[in-house]
Image: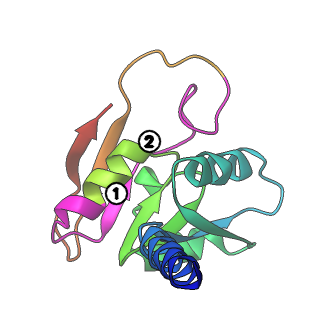
């Protein structure tokens, strides 16, 4: 009986470690006053991400340094597994980015579109998510959701 208990404890530990490794770690920078960013972080957590939120008054500079052009900036800037994800990008697009691992700096959903994850309102059309180049190239459409 003791061997069975030890084996069960070992298997549970292995499962817990394997499961913990599946949760991508994300660091989300947001304006201290923004509530929709907190809702976006909660959305990501519900969908398997380990999100740390950092309020900042320097969001524009953080986004710029990460390669996000001002005209494509979203409401917040997140870093996950070597990529920048700007704005209220749907989780399936973030997962696609992490799975495909394209040679880009990251992706962005500009502005604060109604009905996007973390935002109120009703979605009125597809969300256009842009790929942000690592170099001086032009952004291109990465996904339409």
Q: Nearer the viewer, residue 50 or 61?
A: 50
25 part of magenta stretch: no
As displayed, is residue 21 above or below residue 128?
A: below
As displayed, is residue 63 above or below residue 45?
A: below
Would residue 87 be found to the left or right of residue 95 on screen?
right
Q: Nearer the viewer, residue 21 or 107?
A: 21
Would residue 37 be found to the left or right of residue 14 on screen?
right
Q: Nearer the viewer, residue 97 or 45?
A: 45
Q: Nearer the viewer, residue 134 or 69?
A: 134
The quarter of the picture where residue 77 lies is bottom right
Density class for disc 2 (Cα within 10 Å; few <14, some 14-19, many ≥20) is some
Residue to which mark 1 is pinned: 107
Label 2 vs 1, first from the N-terminus: 2
> What range of the chain is rendered magenta?
98-120
Q: CA distance from mark 2 to mark 1?
A: 11 Å
Q: Quadrant of the C terminus?
A: top left
Q: Report whether residue 109 is seen.
A: no
> In the image, residue 23 lies at what x, y percent?
48, 66
Q: Report whether residue 126 is seen.
A: yes
The quarter of the picture where residue 128 lies is top left
117 part of magenta stretch: yes
Density class for disc 1 (Cα within 10 Å; few <14, some 14-19, many ≥20) is many
Kindly identify the residue that appears in the image at 20 percent across and 77 percent down: 135
């Amino acid at each position: 009986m003791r061997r069975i208990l030890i084996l069960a404890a070992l298997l549970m530990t292995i499962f817990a470690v394997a499961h913990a490794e599946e949760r991508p770690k994300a660091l989300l920078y947001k304006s201290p006053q923004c509530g929709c960013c907190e809702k976006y972080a909660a959305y990501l957590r519900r969908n398997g991400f380990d999100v740390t939120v950092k309020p900042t008054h320097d969001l524009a500079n953080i986004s710029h340094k990460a390669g996000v052009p001002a005209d494509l900036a979203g409401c917040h800037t997140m870093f996950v597994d070597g990529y920048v994800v700007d704005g209220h990008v749907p989780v399936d697009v973030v997962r696609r980015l992490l799975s495909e691992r394209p040679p880009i700096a990251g992706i962005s959903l500009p502005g604060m579109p109604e009905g996007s994850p973390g935002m109120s309102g009703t979605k009125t059309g597809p969300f256009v998510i842009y790929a942000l180049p690592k170099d001086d190239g032009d952004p291109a459409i990465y996904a339409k959701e």
